[in-house]
C-alpha cells in the first residue's frame, strides 16, 4: 500500500461531508456506496466523524477499479460538499486558509498543507497528508477555481518523483491561475 493510502494515526478521523464527495464525484454512485460499505461506511452523515483509514481504504479500491481520473473527479467534488467560508475574496486569501479548511474536516494526526505564495497568481503547496495525489490535485484545482472566477488552474508536481504515489512522504505542487 502506498503512502497515499496510509493514515498517519489509527485514531485519525474524517468528517462525513468530505466522504460525501466520493458519492458525488463518481458517476457510478452504486459502486461508490458498495465500496464505502465494504470498508465500514454505510450511511454517510455530513456532521459525523469516520475512521480515516476506512475512507483511505475506499480510495485505494476506487483507484484500483476506476483509476486516477476517478480520484481527481472526487477531489473536484469536495469544495461543493464541505464547509468552506462563503466569502469569495481571492485565490491567495483562500490558499492562506487551505490548511484551516483541511483541519476543520480531519481530526487526530492527519497531516495538512503548507502554502508558500510565489506571486500574484502562483503558489507552492506542500501536501503532507495520506490522501491520494490525484484526489488532492482535483481538490486544490476546484478550491482555487472557487476564488478566481472559475478561471483555469494549472497544477503540477514540483518534482514528479517526489510523490506519495512513489512512497514519498508528501507531494509538492506548483499551482498557477
Image (cartoon, rainbow, N blue to C red):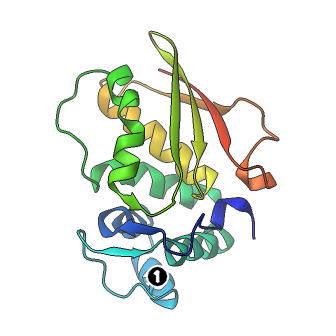
Q: How many marks?
A: 1
Residue drawn at (66%, 59%), measured in percent from left and top? 4
Is residue 39 shown above or below 105?
below
Q: Residues within 10 Å of mark 1 (few under 14, many from 20)?
A: many
Asked if residue 67 can be seen in this view, the reply is no
Please tell me in which quadrant of the rendered image residue 162 appears.
Answer: top right
Is residue 62 shown above or below 98?
below
Residue drawn at (52%, 78%), measured in percent from left and top? 54
Residue drawn at (79%, 55%), measured in percent from left and top? 167
Q: Position of residue 82 (x, y in %)?
A: 29, 54
Q: Position of residue 174 (x, y in %)?
A: 61, 26
Q: Secondary structure at mark 1?
A: helix
Q: Position of residue 153 (x, y in %)?
A: 48, 28
Q: Nearer the viewer, residue 154 or 6?
A: 6
Tell which residue pokes out farthest to the top in this image.
Answer: 120
Residue drawn at (62%, 76%), measured in percent from left and top? 61
Q: Is residue 44 left or right of residue 174?
A: left
Q: Is residue 57 left or right of residue 30?
A: right
Q: Is residue 116 left or right of residue 99?
A: right
Q: Nearer the viewer, residue 103 or 72?
A: 103
Please tell me in which quadrant of the rendered image residue 92 appears.
Answer: top left
Q: Position of residue 3 (x, y in %)?
A: 71, 60
Is residue 126 shown above or below 60?
above
Residue under label 1, please give it. 36
Looking at the rendered image, the quarter that the N terminus falls into is bottom right
Asked if residue 112 can be seen in this view, the reply is yes
Amino acid at each position: 500500500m502506498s503512502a497515499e493510502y496510509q493514515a498517519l494515526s489509527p485514531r485519525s478521523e474524517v468528517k462525513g461531508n468530505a466522504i460525501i464527495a466520493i458519492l458525488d464525484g463518481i458517476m457510478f454512485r452504486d459502486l461508490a456506496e458498495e465500496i464505502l460499505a465494504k470498508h465500514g461506511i454505510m450511511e454517510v452523515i455530513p456532521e459525523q466523524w469516520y475512521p480515516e483509514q476506512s475512507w483511505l481504504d475506499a480510495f485505494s479500491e476506487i483507484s484500483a477499479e476506476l483509476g486516477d481520473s476517478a480520484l481527481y473527479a472526487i477531489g473536484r467534488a469536495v469544495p461543493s460538499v464541505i464547509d468552506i467560508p462563503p466569502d469569495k475574496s481571492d485565490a491567495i486569501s483562500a490558499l492562506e486558509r487551505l490548511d484551516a479548511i483541511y483541519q476543520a474536516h480531519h481530526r487526530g494526526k492527519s497531516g495538512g498543507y503548507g502554502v508558500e505564495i510565489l506571486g500574484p497568481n502562483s503558489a507552492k503547496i506542500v501536501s503532507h497528508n495520506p490522501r491520494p495525489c490525484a484526489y488532492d490535485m482535483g481538490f486544490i484545482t476546484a478550491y482555487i477555481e472557487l476564488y478566481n472566477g472559475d478561471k483555469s488552474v494549472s497544477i503540477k508536481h514540483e518534482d514528479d518523483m517526489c510523490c506519495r504515489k512513489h512512497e514519498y512522504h508528501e507531494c509538492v505542487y506548483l499551482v498557477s491561475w
